[in-house]
Image (spheres, grey):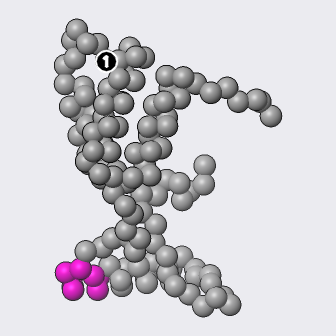
Amino acid sequence: MPELDHCQMLAMIPANAEYSSLNLAAAVQIMCYELRMAVLENTAISPNITPELATIDSIEGFYTHLEATLLHIGYLNPAAPKKLMERIRRIYARSRLEKEEVNLLRGILTLTVTPRKHDKY
């Protein structure tokens, strides 16, 4: 797995197109400087891209789909539900799901119930 897949947030440093490479020490210095300037200016540090967040209706649809799937596969026991769905909802709520992420998760749920067979290469 590429190392960047382990990152939770990526940053890009604009550079000269003819020589767009920085050594690690220079990149760290630039990032530290930018973080310090943001803190001094009391500026929120966030990615430049603002993705479209999922709507409440979309997220509620996902939760309904998730609960139905978890019941179908036997993960949730309707006779003793405990607080599992409440806890699962809190996990997803912390991540501020984007519209595309909800669609991706619902696709996984659909195929969990009805798997698609792929030819082996």
Q: In the image, 1: left or right of 65?
A: right
Magenta-drawn stretch, dominant element (helix, strand or loop) = helix
Q: Nearer the viewer, residue 77 or 12?
A: 77
Q: In the image, 98: left or right of 79?
A: right
At x 32% / y 45%, what residue is drawn? 58
Label 1 environment density (alpha carbons within 10 Å; few <14, some 14–19, many ≥20): some
Q: Nearer the viewer, residue 51 or 61?
A: 61
Q: Position of residue 43 (x, y in %)?
A: 24, 80
Q: In the image, 108: left or right of 70?
A: right
Q: Is residue 37 magenta?
A: yes
Q: In which quadrant of the rendered image does the C terminus lie?
A: top right
Question: What are the residue bounds of the magenta stretch?
Answer: 36-43
Using the image, determine if residue 101 lies above or below residue 13. Answer: above
Looking at this rendering, what residue extends furthest in the top direction? 79
Q: Nearer the viewer, residue 119 or 37?
A: 119
Q: Position of residue 23 (x, y in %)?
A: 58, 80
Using the image, determine if residue 49 lies above or below residue 23. Answer: above
Rendering quarter of residue 40: bottom left
Residue marked by disc 1: 76
Q: Is residue 14 magenta?
A: no
Asked whether residue 28 is in view, the answer is yes
